[in-house]
Amino acid sequence: MTDGRTRDNQSIRDRAYVHIQRKIASGELRPGDAVSELALSRELGSSRTPIREAIGQLVAEGLLEQLHNRGAVVVQLTRQDIIDLYELREALEIYAVAKVARDASSRADLDRLSSLTNEILVLRDELQQSGGSELNAQQMHRFVTCDLSFHTLLIRMAGNARITKLLNETRLLMRIFAIHRHGHTVALLERIHRYHSSVLKAVAKKDAEAAAKALSEHIKTSQRERLEDFDHWEREATLRESLPGFLDVHSTEPR
């Protein structure tokens, strides 16, 4: 029988687990940053034991890695990691969206998908009216929330909790590298809107083949863009190591 102290530790461990994930997703903890048991225990007002357990779970899931003499740090994805994650995402999301398209979808779910799709155009219009070249940080936060909600709802509509959990973990890992990115442009927002619209229309028409095709093209395009981002970031990182101070004058932050 579980005693009160064990339940308390479990609750704190769960809170710490979510707390660390949020720090990573928001960019507060960046790739290579150390995760301090002491700092987290102070933030959460707990002992270090459940914090250590939460960190161990995140190490096992690949969000953190254990380094000799440094403890746990946020993982830095490699180019192959990005390829692997996108291949996994494509396989699972295509299966899920085809299942959703074959089954009957509620009007409420379709309306919510439509609203999330239209929000991308709202952001595009704001960007055009501002005269800027890309979304600012606050607008990018809105975009990420909207995009994640669209894909997450599609997966949840498939009714498979294990796929939902695995894809949530996969997306969080991809967010680690996405921290390097600039804001979206008008052209990119319009392209993403077209893909989301195509997926939504196919699901509404119960056309599983068209839904799977549209989503596959969307994910493959996103993968190519992330790999271009990675190659750009890696070149700049190499320049920073070989020519300290050069990019501070001649370039911007890594994408």
Image (cartoon, rainbow, N blue to C red):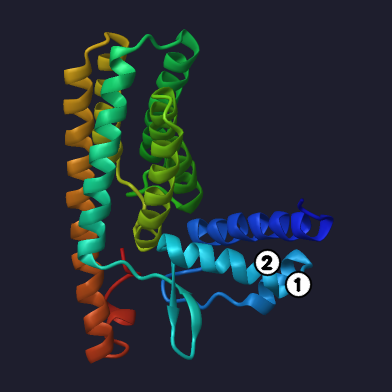
On the rendered structure, is 171 left or right of 12? left
Which quadrant of the view contains residue 246?
Answer: bottom left
| The C terminus, quarter of image | bottom left
Q: Position of residue 142 (x, y in %)?
A: 49, 41
Q: Position of residue 141 (x, y in %)?
A: 48, 47
Tell me if label 1 and label 2 are in contact, CB under 8 Å.
Answer: yes
Between 8 and 22, the residue placed more toward the observer is 8
Does residue 200 appear in this view?
no
Does residue 5 appear in this view?
yes
In the image, residue 179 above or below residue 66: above
Between 35 and 238, the residue placed more toward the observer is 35
Give, as a three-letter code, the residue at label 1. Ser
Q: Which residue is mark 2?
A: 50
The residue lying at 16 percent from left, 27 percent from top is 213
On the rendered structure, is 52 left or right of 83? right
In the image, residue 23 above or below residue 114: below
The residue lying at 18 percent from left, 19 percent from top is 210
Q: Which residue is mark 1?
A: 47
The residue lying at 64 percent from left, 55 percent from top is 14
Which quadrant of the view contains residue 209?
Answer: top left
